[in-house]
Image: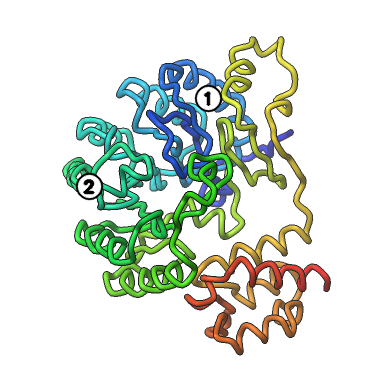
Amino acid sequence: METADFRLGKNAPRLGLYLHIPFCARKCFYCDFYSVEQPQLIDRYLAALIRQMEEAAPLCEVYTVDTVFVGGGTPSLLSDGQWEQLFSALSACFSLESDRETTVEVNPDSASPGQLALLRRLGVNRLSIGAQSFDDRLLRSIGRLHDAAQVTATVKAARAAGFDNVNLDLMYALPDQTPQQFYDSLRRAFALEAEHLSAYGLKVEANTPFGRMGDALILPDEDTWAEEYLTLCRLAEEAGLKQYEISNFARPGRASRHNLKYWMLEEYLGLGPAAHSFFRGRRFGFSRDLSAFLAYYETPREQRGSPAALLSECSAITEQDLLLEDVMLALRTARGIDLLRFRERHGKDFEELAGAKLQKYLCAGLMCREDGRIRMTPRGFLVSNAILAELLDQVESE
């Protein structure tokens, strides 16, 4: 692809950058994210990832990167030298905005105080800590390698390193977890005064240890799930964390700028196996195959085939695609669909497109209209998948 020829400045388009670190010390029993238990390959992988960054750089010349997210897997398995290597390449390959948001995911069992201090010196200004629960028995039962005390210690070490923007990941509706156990974990998370909370109900995926357990896995019923979710929303609000997406809550000004790109249909580029992108008019994703990734980037460039061989999917985005994605993604957020912005962006009226099906959900209290927006209520978020499926079917047929 050709790139435009102009100097970067305040009007340069912004880009989010996601870097995947596909390594774990051990896979959690619920996890379907792509990772491998082969940390001995990290050096080779970083060399390959940096080659991919270098080869992607020309396509990004007209962009300023304003968010960086290093996710996994378990990025905190990297050594100090590997972190320095990665961030040196990041600065060399991309035009980085001075006040960018740079997030790194860490696990409490592998994030040392020294590593956190190094990350802060390298320009990381947001940490996402995989807590999942503050109940040690539950942590063991879902395959986590840390305990609750290590979560607290990691948050304290992050503060000592200078981090003032910390996210905690929690899970609910876990096997053999009572509502009270989840609420206790919530309160312990609030006591640590994190700026952001991501809380996810367990979704059992087929290709995981939990998925292979079948009916032997005892899960909370739908009423318990609903009770836990609605209580989560209420308790988070009382703790000063405002909901801004189905599963995400933040203090004022602390919503994840990177994740907002996904929901606001802004451009982002994902690098590494299993990473996905919305970039230059296309959506594409790389295959969940570390071996293929290494083989490709360890081959001299002049001897390689097309990088398309590494893609699991790639499609051009049509105007209709953008409209449907805008509906789906905006309604995942607490702000919902801005009716005026929707009309200006797509040349169509959302309420007319959604018709009687929208009115049904408004009357049922699952959605609401206020301040020129249509959004889900907390009860609507509980059944958002069904609502979105019906609304998208209606909008697409118009």
Q: Earlier in the sequence, mark 1 or mark 2?
A: 1
The colour style of the image is: rainbow
For the residues labelled 1 and 2, say whether their Cβ atoms are less than 8 Å apart.
no
Do we see residue 234 in this rendering?
A: yes
Question: Which residue is located at x 44 percent, y 20 percent?
Answer: 42
Question: Which residue is located at x 40 percent, y 55 percent?
Answer: 174
Give the quarter of the image for residue 150.
top left
Give the quarter of the image for residue 290.
top right
Tell us which disc is closer to us: 1 or 2: 2
Q: Name the disc covering residue 34, or none.
A: none
Q: Residues within 10 Å of mark 2 (few under 14, many from 20)?
A: some
Image quadrant in which the N terminus is located: top right
| Residue position for label 1 | 49
Q: Position of residue 51 (x, y in %)?
A: 56, 21
| Residue position for label 2 | 148
Taking 340 as reference, is 275 above or below it? above
- Give whichever of 232, 210 is nearer the camera: 210
Mark 2: amino acid = Ala
Horizontal side of residue 342 vs 120, given as left or right? right
Q: Position of residue 62 (x, y in %)?
A: 60, 40
